[in-house]
């Protein structure tokens, strides 16, 4: 009753294959992170962000920063903030409706639209924003141009489907006894959502929101077409051009003139990686606690 | 009380807005592509040469470039992803399983621009040295990096399917004396075909839709590459290049056509996923 | 000497077996010998450790996290004793020789034929011709052949619950195990299917020693040659066949522990 030699060979091959795949993947990711850390860690410091400008004056916008990434960081923060202001309430509300109210038919249609939107490449979303400006210029607003607001709208459209889906999934993942709790106490559907379901699903939704922020912060293709520029200082209005971290990285990769600029590019990339990494960690933690809570 | 009564309507409005947004984007794109149909511009777009200043606006090389890069990335990423998913679900010892899974999750959050940026200084010189040909910005470079980008998508979708299967089949198969590798080969993999297909289709969608990696690494020459070390250009990079360089508006037709093609590919992918049934979100 | 020889050697020896899951004691100092030709039943309320006892025999407890097993389980295969928990014992081969039928029918989502054939092909490395014969014999042994012979390539999930459970039994029998473990194999079946399967076990125990668990006293009375009563992971009583058949005695034992 010994295993045949043939079988033992294929077993060994399977095991080796799986281990190799896992190790290769881990190595690749660690190589990316390690290389960035190796080249960028030395540049981290106030100088990277503010250059020669005093930090307080830079933060207040009194004096522009020429050789630091402060404006890019601020631009990205503004972009994330604006797009989340637009997308988060809409996305969560839409997700609640789809999960708790919508008829089967509506759910199917809207679900398809949401999935479709989630699949739209970000460059197409950028193109959409860019075309909006073209159309506006030919019609109502001859002086329309790309800028912060447009980019925020497009990014909001980009992350909206994620928000809808994570809200929907967080609510759908709740145990059914919880769903019956409200009605058994005489709550209206909305009261049940407001006081029972939303607080229970809160962390799942929160993790979705954080992930959406991460996506908003990292996306480059949309802002490439909707108003990000290489040198802009802080935007003075919603219609101004702006700088952003991912765009700066993209730009500097090709356009660095000196070794110092290249070092700064590595520093910028590291900052962006740490930013998205932190957001990811937060989202992961929120999701974890949510799962622990309902798996008992 | 009034507020509470209003809420469902507000929620409904939000849901409708989400739905309308998808439709709106499609409508705008169609509106922009319309001139191509009325003035017979498709003929100039569906062509093999991109020489805009000579009035040739063909985007077929970009279609080919997109397909080559996306399919190449799938060819690299799929076997890897199958290995990783099986490793995580069946073979990995407890702690390593957790670490590996967390790392794959983390990969989804690495910005594409970072992959592109790091590769320029890490992979491109290597490719240039190893093959001693060209600039290192090539189809092969972009394909390798893109496979890393789509890997977590495939792994996570596949692993979700495997987890469900494993839950019901693991103990049964252990009791029948299957070794764990045999269990992977003969039970899990044959049974997860549908999930694997969904994962591959989703991965393909990500690969086609990605801009930054091909834009930064593929070299962007608007031609059909003759070898993996040749430069090529994808539809997404084409849009980025033409729009971002403030080209003349006569060039835009080709860009809108590229956008519509990408959009339609995504519709197709969604339809395929619907047919496969279930929800496959990474 | 003549008489000594007639007392058969046991097939399975469980000595001082204790199992803990994440620190929680599930089985404590259980002893049991299983002889050829007999069907021993462990009976007890849910949570008494019955299933854990069975799974200790084919080391299936290890498929669950934080399991700690102590004590000795030995099995006699081809006149040689194997310590089941010895590191040198090949686990997969061991499990092949110890057939287990689960509480819920658990056919794999393949065809009827493939369910029985797959372990033969993979674990025993049989060729297709042998496999076909073996599958047919196994399905005949569980009286399923006539019902499914025209639809062997339909999904096993199209079968009724009772048929599925017989299919799972056939899958195990096809591997020609040395003994059978039955984990409440009729718990999820209706009355008629239950009787059908119980009748099968009556004939099967002539060929295979069987260790079964149940929480159903009626089934115990119908099937068991010997009974051990489990409570909170300990063996608290034992009954022989005459005692089982004595309604007064078995009622007293049952009432004491349920």
Image (cartoon, coloured by chain):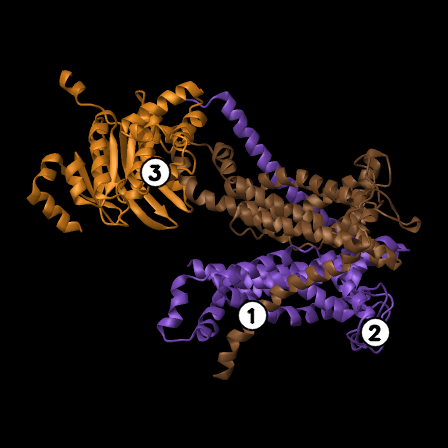
The lab-note entry on whether marks 2 and 3 share a chain reads no
Chain A palette colour: purple
Residue A74 appears in the figure: no
Q: Is residue B134 above or below residue C35?
A: below
Please give the count of numbered marks on the rendered protein. 3
What chain does mark 3 sit on? C
Expressed as whole percent of the image width and height from the top left, the position of residue B209 reads 70, 51
Q: Please check whether the numbered discs 1 and 2 fall on a single chain.
A: yes
Residue found at x 87% / y 68%: A66
Residue occupied by mark 3: C159
Q: Report how far apart the C-alphas of labels 2 and 3 lie in the structure.
A: 78 Å
The answer to whether marks 2 and 3 mark residues whose Cβ atoms lie closer than 8 Å is: no
> Which color was chain C given?
orange
* Badge nearest the viewer, 1 or 2: 1
Dot 1: element: helix
Colour of chain B as rendered: brown
- In the rendered structure, the residue with mark 2 lies on which chain? A
Front residue of this view, candidates A275 and A56:
A275
Report in which chain the residue with disc 1 lies: A
Residue A54 numbered tag: 2
Kindly identify which numbered label has been placed on residue A93: 1
């Amino acid at each position: 009753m010994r295993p045949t030699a043939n079988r033992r060979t294929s077993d060994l091959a399977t095991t080796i294959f799986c281990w190799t795949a896992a190790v290769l993947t881990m190595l690749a990711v660690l190589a990316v992170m390690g290389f960035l850390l190796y080249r960028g860690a030395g540049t981290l410091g106030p100088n990277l962000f503010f250059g020669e400008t005093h930090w307080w004056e830079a933060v207040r916008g009194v004096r522009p920063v020429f050789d630091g990434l402060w404006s890019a960081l601020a631009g990205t923060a503004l972009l994330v903030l604006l797009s989340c202001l637009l997308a988060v309430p809409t996305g969560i509300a839409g997700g609640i409706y789809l999960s708790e109210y919508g008829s089967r038919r509506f759910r199917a249609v809207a679900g398809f639209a949401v999935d479709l939107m989630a699949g739209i490449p970000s460059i197409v979303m950028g193109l959409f924003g860019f075309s909006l400006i073209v159309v506006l210029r030919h019609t109502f607003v001859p002086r329309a141009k790309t800028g912060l607001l447009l980019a925020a709208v497009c990014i909001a459209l980009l992350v909206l489907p994620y928000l809808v889906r994570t809200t929907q999934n967080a609510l759908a993942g709740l145990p059914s006894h919880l769903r019956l709790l409200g009605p058994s106490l005489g709550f209206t559907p909305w009261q049940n959502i407001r006081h029972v379901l939303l607080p229970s699903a809160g962390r799942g939704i929160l993790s979705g929101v954080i992930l959406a922020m991460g996506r908003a912060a990292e996306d480059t293709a949309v802002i490439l077409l909707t108003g990000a520029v290489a040198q802009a200082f802080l935007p003075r209005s919603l219609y101004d051009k702006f700088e952003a971290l991912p765009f700066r990285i993209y730009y500097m990769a090709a356009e660095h003139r000196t070794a110092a600029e290249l070092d700064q590019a590595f520093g910028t990339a590291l900052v962006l990686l740490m930013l998205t990494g932190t957001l990811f960690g937060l989202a992961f933690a929120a999701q974890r606690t949510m799962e622990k809570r309902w798996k008992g | 009380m009034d507020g509470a009564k209003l809420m469902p309507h507000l929620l409904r409005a939000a849901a409708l807005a989400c739905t309308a947004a998808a439709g709106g984007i499609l409508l705008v794109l169609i509106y922009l592509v319309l001139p191509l149909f009325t003035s017979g511009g498709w003929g100039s777009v569906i062509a093999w040469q991109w020489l805009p200043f000579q009035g040739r606006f063909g985007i077929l090389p970009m279609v080919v470039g997109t397909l080559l890069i996306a399919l190449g990335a799938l060819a690299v990423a799929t076997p890897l992803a199958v290995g990783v998913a099986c490793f995580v679900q069946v073979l990995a010892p407890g702690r390593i399983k957790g670490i590996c899974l967390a790392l794959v999750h983390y990969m989804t959050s690495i910005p594409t621009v970072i992959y592109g940026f790091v590769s320029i200084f890490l992979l491109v010189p290597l490719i240039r040295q190893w093959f001693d040909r060209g600039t290192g910005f090539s189809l092969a470079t972009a394909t390798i990096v893109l496979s890393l980008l789509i890997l977590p998508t495939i792994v996570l979708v596949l692993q979700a399917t495997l987890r469900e299967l494993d839950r019901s089949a693991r103990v049964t198969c252990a009791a029948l004396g299957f070794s764990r590798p045999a269990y992977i080969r003969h039970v899990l993999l044959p049974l997860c075909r549908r999930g694997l297909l969904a994962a591959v289709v989703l991965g393909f969608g990500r690969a086609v839709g990605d801009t930054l990696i091909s834009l930064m690494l593929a070299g962007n020459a608007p031609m059909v590459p003759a070898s993996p070390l040749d430069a090529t250009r994808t539809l997404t990079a084409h849009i980025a290049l033409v729009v971002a360089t403030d080209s003349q508006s006569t060039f835009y037709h080709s860009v809108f056509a590229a956008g519509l093609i990408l959009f339609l590919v995504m519709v197709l992918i969604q339809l395929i996923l619907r047919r496969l049934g279930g929800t496959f979100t990474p | 000497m003549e008489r000594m020889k007639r007392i058969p050697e046991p097939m399975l020896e469980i000595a001082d077996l204790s199992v803990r899951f994440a620190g929680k004691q599930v089985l404590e100092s259980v002893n049991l010998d299983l002889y050829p030709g007999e069907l021993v039943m462990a009976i007890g309320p849910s949570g008494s450790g019955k299933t854990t006892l069975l799974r200790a025999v084919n080391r299936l407890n290890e498929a669950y996290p934080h399991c700690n097993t102590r004590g000795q389980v030995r099995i006699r295969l081809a006149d040689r004793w194997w310590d089941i928990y010895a590191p040198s014992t090949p686990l997969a081969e061991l499990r092949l020789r110890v057939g287990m039928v689960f509480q819920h029918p658990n056919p794999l989502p393949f065809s009827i034929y493939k369910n029985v054939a797959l372990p033969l092909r993979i674990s025993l490395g049989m060729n297709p011709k042998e496999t076909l014969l073996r599958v047919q014999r196994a399905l005949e042994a569980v009286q399923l052949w006539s019902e499914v012979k025209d639809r062997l390539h339909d999904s096993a999930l199209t079968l009724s619950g009772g048929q599925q459970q017989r299919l799972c039994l056939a899958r195990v029998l096809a591997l020609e195990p040395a003994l059978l473990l039955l984990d409440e194999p009729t718990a999820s079946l209706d009355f008629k299917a239950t009787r059908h399967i119980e009748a099968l076990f009556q004939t099967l125990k002539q060929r295979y020693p069987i260790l079964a668990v149940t929480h159903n006293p009626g089934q115990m009375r119908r099937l068991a040659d010997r009974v051990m009563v489990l409570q909170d992971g300990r063996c608290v009583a034992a009954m022989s066949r005459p005692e089982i058949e004595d309604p007064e005695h078995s009622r007293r034992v049952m009432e004491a522990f349920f």
